[in-house]
């Protein structure tokens, strides 16, 4: 038993290292430098100070970027619209208000035209009192220019409404006086033609994709040319030139009506501010009335 155990024990004894297990490991050196001592508790990693300020703890006060710059847009805040017309609700309310005012103006004006045309008593009265016509022309020019040029007046309620009422009354009297010198049948036909043209242009302006607002300067030049043509026609009057002058004037102000409708609807390059509903109604109203006067002809 001892003989068999001795070779095994002797063989196991060959694998036992000469050094003791509990003895510390030999020191290793790399280019003559000692490694840093090993510590049982490793050093904690502290993030930089700039990173710790970005961490917000619940229940503590912190300052966000929106507090520093409230006007700056964030990922969750919708961008502020560049124009009030970008909101479809605002634009539709603006268009509805302008058309309501325009409808009242046109109904009143054409009602005055019908009274001045059908009533022989009123016709004789307005034809003999030209001072009232000149007074209405002066009042119309002053108030209309003030509404168009002075924004503080055209945007101040209720004075802007009062100014528009004065313009409508004075221009209605002027148009009724002019219509009283013409044949009743011709006036009625001209009113129907004017309304048909106006409705067609308004519908076309709302549906077309062509931008006519960029041609506003060209229409102003054509308006000056038309005024000069009418001035020369007063010295060389003929029936043909009178018809030509009326057709050119009606065509020009039909283009003005198209541009003004696109400015009001705000779907093209240029647009009116939603607060300019008085000026928008005034421009379209003047365009329609001038189309009527040019189609009616001069006397």
Image (cartoon, rainbow, N blue to C red):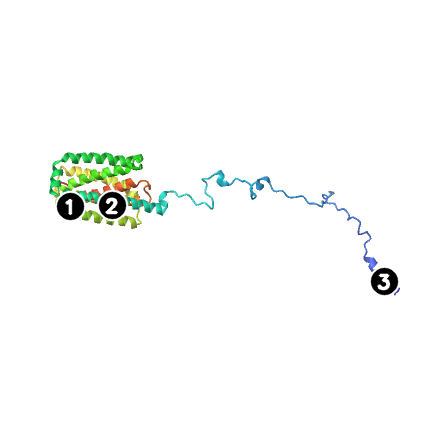
Q: Position of residue 133 (x, y in %)?
A: 16, 36
Using a 10 Å C-alpha cutoff, classify the residue at mark 3 as few (fewer than 14 neighbours), some (14 to 19) or many (20 or more).
few
Question: Which of 272/90 is in front?
Answer: 90
Location of the N terminus by quadrant is: bottom right
Q: Position of residue 105 (x, y in %)?
A: 23, 43
Of the residues under marks 2 and 3, which one precedes in the sequence?
A: 3
Residue found at x 36% / y 43%: 84
Placement of 3 over or under 143, stated as above or below: below
Of the residues under marks 1 and 3, which one precedes in the sequence?
A: 3
Residue found at x 17% / y 47%: 190
- Nearest-to-viewer mark from 2 and 1: 2
* Whether residue 252 is visible: no
- Nearest-to-viewer mark from 2 and 3: 2
Which residue is disc 1 drawn over? 187
Question: Which of 10/202 is in front?
Answer: 202
Which residue is disc 3 drawn over? 7
C-alpha distance separating marks 1 and 3: 141 Å
Residue found at x 83% / y 60%: 11
* Whether residue 277 is visible: yes
Which residue is disc 2 drawn over? 103
Task: Check disc 3 and report its element: helix, strand or loop.
Answer: helix
**Along the horizontal axis of the image, is 108 left or right of 90?**
left
Question: Which of 197/225 is in front?
Answer: 197
Q: Position of residue 83 (x, y in %)?
A: 37, 42
**Along the horizontal axis of the image, is 276 left or right of 248?**
right
Question: Which of 5/15 is in front?
Answer: 5
**Along the horizontal axis of the image, is 207 left or right of 21?**
left
């Amino acid at each position: 038993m001892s003989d068999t155990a001795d070779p095994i024990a002797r063989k196991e004894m060959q694998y036992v290292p000469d050094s003791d297990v509990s003895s510390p490991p030999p020191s290793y050196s790399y280019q003559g430098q000692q490694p840093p001592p090993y510590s049982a508790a490793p050093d904690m990693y502290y993030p930089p100070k700039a990173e710790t300020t970005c961490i917000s703890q619940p229940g503590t006060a912190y300052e966000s970027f929106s507090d520093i710059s409230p006007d700056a847009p964030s990922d969750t805040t919708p961008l502020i619209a560049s124009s009030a017309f970008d909101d479809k609700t605002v634009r539709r309310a603006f268009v509805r208000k302008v058309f309501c005012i325009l409808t009242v103006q046109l109904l009143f004006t054409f009602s005055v035209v019908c009274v001045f045309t059908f009533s022989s008593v009123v016709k004789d009265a307005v034809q003999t009192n030209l001072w009232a016509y000149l007074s209405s022309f002066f009042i119309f020019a002053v108030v209309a220019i003030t509404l168009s040029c002075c924004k503080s007046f055209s945007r101040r309620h209720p004075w802007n409404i009062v100014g528009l009422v004065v313009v409508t009354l004075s221009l209605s009297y002027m148009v009724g006086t002019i219509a009283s010198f013409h044949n009743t049948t011709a006036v009625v036909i001209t009113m129907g033609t004017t309304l048909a043209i106006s409705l067609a242009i308004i519908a076309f302006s709302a549906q077309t994709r062509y931008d006519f607002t960029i041609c506003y300067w060209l229409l102003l030049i054509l308006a000056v040319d038309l005024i000069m043509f009418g001035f020369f026609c007063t010295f060389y009057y003929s029936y043909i030139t009178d018809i030509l002058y009326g057709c050119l004037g009606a065509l020009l102000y039909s283009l003005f009506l198209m541009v003004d409708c696109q400015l009001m609807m705000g779907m093209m390059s240029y647009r009116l501010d939603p607060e300019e509903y008085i000026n928008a109604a005034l421009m379209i109203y003047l365009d329609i009335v001038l189309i009527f006067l040019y189609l009616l002809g001069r006397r």
